[in-house]
Image: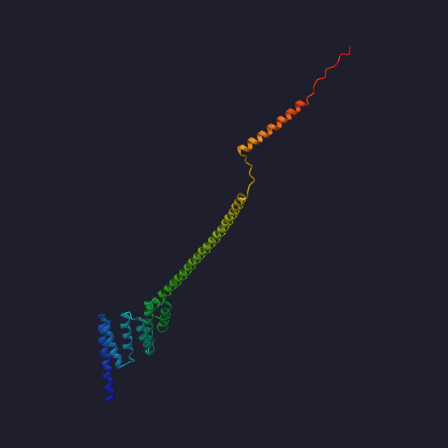
Amino acid sequence: MLLLIVSNTAMGQTNRFILEGNKLYDQQKYKEAEADYSKALAKDPNNTSGLFNLGNSLYQQKRYDSSRKIMSETAKLASSKTGKAAANYNIGNTYMSQQKWEDAINSYKQTLRNNPQDVDAKYNLSYAEEMMKKQQQQNKDKKQDKQNKDQQKQDQKDKQNQDKKDQDKKDKQDQQKQDQNQDKKDDQNKEDQQPQSQPSKLTQQQADQLLNALQQEEKKLQDKMKKEKGVPVKLQKDW
């Protein structure tokens, strides 16, 4: 009888904390409600109502990972399919809030396995599937866009490399041409530096002497020609 009284007292305290938590929850005082639910669970750790409500209060505080952990425990401890369905539905909602569409889909499917008539679960399942398709298409587009940008960068890099090769080739040809022109200039300079035969230049005195010599030679030649000139012979009369 003593054990029964103690048990009833503990159950009463657990239920009192849960009720107080529910009042605070309805007032949107989720942090305070969490505290009362935690007190209830300290008295009865396996109380599915306390666990479920605690998970909801955490969800309203956007503490999705903590809420999901509590809801997972609730789903394990729930004795009815309806309770398991409700817990999995809330797990799906935590994934939806984090845009983890595939995990949300699996949770809603689990909900419908336990409660095929759950209209909200059907709607959320369809929504999550649509969002996952959209996300997959976006990821595909991003991947394609990245590949296009990478290809553009590679094409630009290839063009720069080819331009550099062409410029290097042109520079080399220009250098060769410049070297050839320089070689021609060097050869010309060498030729210009070779000693050239210069016509002899006579001084005025030498020129006068040469002229006099020529005049003397010409005079001698004229004198000689006079001496050798034929003299007419007078003929004797034959009568």
Please state which of residues 3 and 231 is positioned toward the viewer in this rendering.
Answer: 231
Residue 119 in sight from this viewpoint: no
Is 152 on the left or on the right of 31, as rendered?
Answer: right
Q: Residue at x 64, y 24 (%)?
A: 223
Is 35 on the left or on the right of 78, as rendered?
Answer: left
In this rendering, the answer to whether 105 lies above or below 10 is: above
Please state which of residues 34 and 229 is positioned toward the viewer in this rendering.
Answer: 229
Please state which of residues 186 and 195 is positioned toward the viewer in this rendering.
Answer: 195
Q: Position of residue 100 (x, y in %)?
A: 35, 68
In this rendering, the answer to whether 236 lies above or below 25 is: above
Residue extending furthest right? Answer: 239
Q: Residue at x 55, y 32 (%)?
A: 207
Q: Position of residue 66 (x, y in %)?
A: 30, 73
Q: Hey, which quadrant is residue 137 in on the image?
A: bottom left
In this rendering, the answer to whether 37 lies above or below 221 is: below
Please state which of residues 192 and 141 is positioned toward the viewer in this rendering.
Answer: 192
Q: Position of residue 118 (x, y in %)?
A: 33, 70
Q: Position of residue 2 (x, y in %)?
A: 23, 89
Residue 17 in sight from this viewpoint: yes
Q: Hey, which quadrant is residue 110 in on the image?
A: bottom left
Residue extending furthest top? Answer: 239
